[in-house]
Amino acid sequence: MNVDVLSERLPDLARRHGVPGGQFVLRHEGATYTVLFGEEEAGTGRPVRADSKFPTGSITKTFTAALAMVLVDEGDLDLDRPLADELPDLRVPGASFGEKQTLRQLLSHSSGLPPGRDSDDLAGTTRRGYLADCARTRPIPECGSSFSYSNIGYVVAGFLVEHVARMEWREALETILLTPLGIEPAYITPPAGRPHVPGHAARATGTALPVRQTLPRVEAAAGALALSAADLLAYGLLHTDGA
């Protein structure tokens, strides 16, 4: 593995495409190779470090799924038990969702829940209120019949984890999954914790404009994580033979 070539090629590609900076980590034949380049935020001169935390977006969903599967493996969750049996807040008058749908369907995006809600409308929303709204949502398509990507489904999966683990999603994620892997995360949702790198939008001129990513706390399980490339490598190795 020629790291020198990567160290030259990646910054060149970043400049060409208006990317301020980044991290590259590769595991090959038992060795780990790391390349860092550029700055965390355009115009600041603050260099990207090995532990800089970048928002991961919906990669967060895979962590929520892995966390849920640990609880399944320990016998605390059942992939095929109706959701309303675990989350009584789904039992509301006029409910259309929860009595048939399962964790398996949430994790595989086949529960029939819609893609998502306008995050601007969710500030201050409680778990009980969110679940009550979900319960009154008519599944489209019919649950279990086909794939339909859903942020809402992973928010509900996060609530299910919280209910069973008796911890908030963030605490459960760190206690059960991240800390054993040596991962110290940041989050784009409140409360504020470790700093994270902002996202960037490309201008017509090709320059990058820093963009602060936000997400309502209630939707954390669907997209709140900010991690380094090394963190993602550690997580990836969890799902392989570690080579």
Image: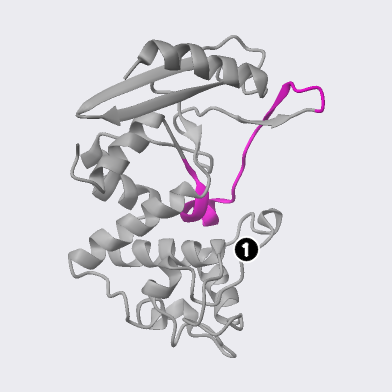
Q: Is residue 5 visible?
A: yes
**Residue drawn at (46%, 54%), measured in percent from left and top?**
221
165 or 34: nearer the eye?
Answer: 34
Q: Quadrant of residue 96?
A: bottom right
Name the spot of residue 229 as percent of width and height, x first: 40, 30
**Horizontally, is 82 left or right of 239 in the view?**
right
Q: Quadrant of residue 106?
A: bottom left
| Mark 1 lies on residue | 116
**Horizontally, is 161 left or right of 39 in the view?**
left
Name the spot of residue 21 as percent of width and height, x first: 55, 20
**Residue drawn at (44%, 29%), measured in percent from left and top?**
194
Magenta segment, which residues? 204-225
Q: Is residue 169 visible?
A: no
Find the residue positioned furthest to the right: 204
**Horizontally, is 170 left or right of 135 in the view?**
left
84 or 192: nearer the eye?
Answer: 84
- Quarter occupied by the C terminus: top left
